[in-house]
Image (cartoon, grey):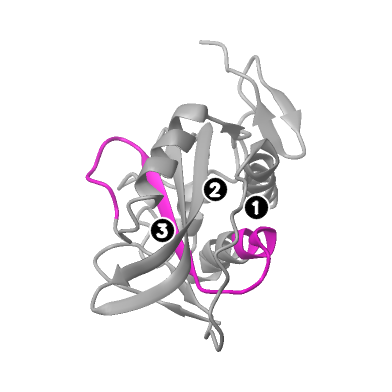
Amino acid sequence: MFPLRQRPLCLTIIVICMMAWLSHAQFCYNQETSDFILKIHNRIRSAVGGCRINKLENDEELEEKAKNWTERCEFKHREKDGYGENLGLSTSKKNLTAIIAQLTEAWAQESSLCNHQTQTRCGDCCHYSQIVWSTTVKLGCYITRCPLIKVGKKEYKNAWFLACFYTPRGNNSGKKAYEIVCETKCMEGQIEENGLCAGAARD
């Protein structure tokens, strides 16, 4: 497995060499799948050790947007519409849970490429910084198996296309992904859960 990068878009492609044709077995993207992706995201966020980092929640509207986008089988970002976005691609023959975990963990591995205590531009770690962006609250993801999908001039057959959308979006220029030191761990009205801040903050 090896990551490829395509600039200027912040895209992650994981391509696992495939020796045999993948079957066209159907899969069921259900609440269990959504919860699995959410759990991975919140685990990554809780490991940061920062403060006032919101606990993510699943959002059906974002999930529907991700579903509609991946089913186009076009590996590119949507036009800017106010949502944060991470994209991943895999030709792995592993089960769907393992593929989702691989793609999400690949985004998280970018953490070593940036210093989030000082850096105010995401640079080489835009996927990771969106995952841990402290003010992001909602997440919606979907994964689709594409018979054929193009990435630049390359074509991949029977590839899994994962998209995750986030709101409020992260990677805002001039701002850090999160703070290490704050007056309080969470905002007033929130409850700390495993290092994350759950619930709505009071104005």
Instruction: Where is residue 1? Give x, y as percent.
Output: 56, 82
Give yes or no for contact between labels 3 and 2 (Cβ–Cβ under 8 Å). no
Instruction: Where is residue 202? Give x, y as percent.
Output: 56, 11
Residue 84 is a magenta residue:
yes
Q: Residue at x 69, y 46 (%)?
A: 36
Residue stretch rendered in magenta on the structure: 77-101
Q: Nearer the viewer, residue 145 or 8?
A: 145
> Element at badge 1?
helix
Q: Nearer the viewer, residue 71 or 123?
A: 71
Instruction: Where is residue 180? Give x, y as percent.
Output: 59, 46
Residue labelled with disc 3: 126
Looking at the image, the residue that sits furthest to the right is: 194
Mark 3 to mark 2: distance in Å? 10 Å
Identify the amino acid type marked 1: Ile
Going from N to C along the chain, the mark reached first, 3 or 2, is 3
Going from N to C along the chain, the mark reached first, 2 or 1, is 1
Looking at the image, the residue that sits furthest to the top is: 203
Identify the amino acid type marked 3: Cys
Q: Residues within 10 Å of mark 2 (few under 14, many from 20)?
A: many
Q: Nearer the viewer, residue 170 or 90?
A: 90
Numbered tag placed on residue 75 in the rendering: none
Q: Is residue 196 visible?
A: yes
Residue labelled with disc 2: 132
Q: Residue at x 38, y 58 (%)?
A: 122
Give yes or no for contact between labels 3 and 1 (Cβ–Cβ under 8 Å). no
Q: Residue at x 50, y 46 (%)?
A: 142
Say left or right for 147 vs 181. left
Residue labelled with disc 1: 44
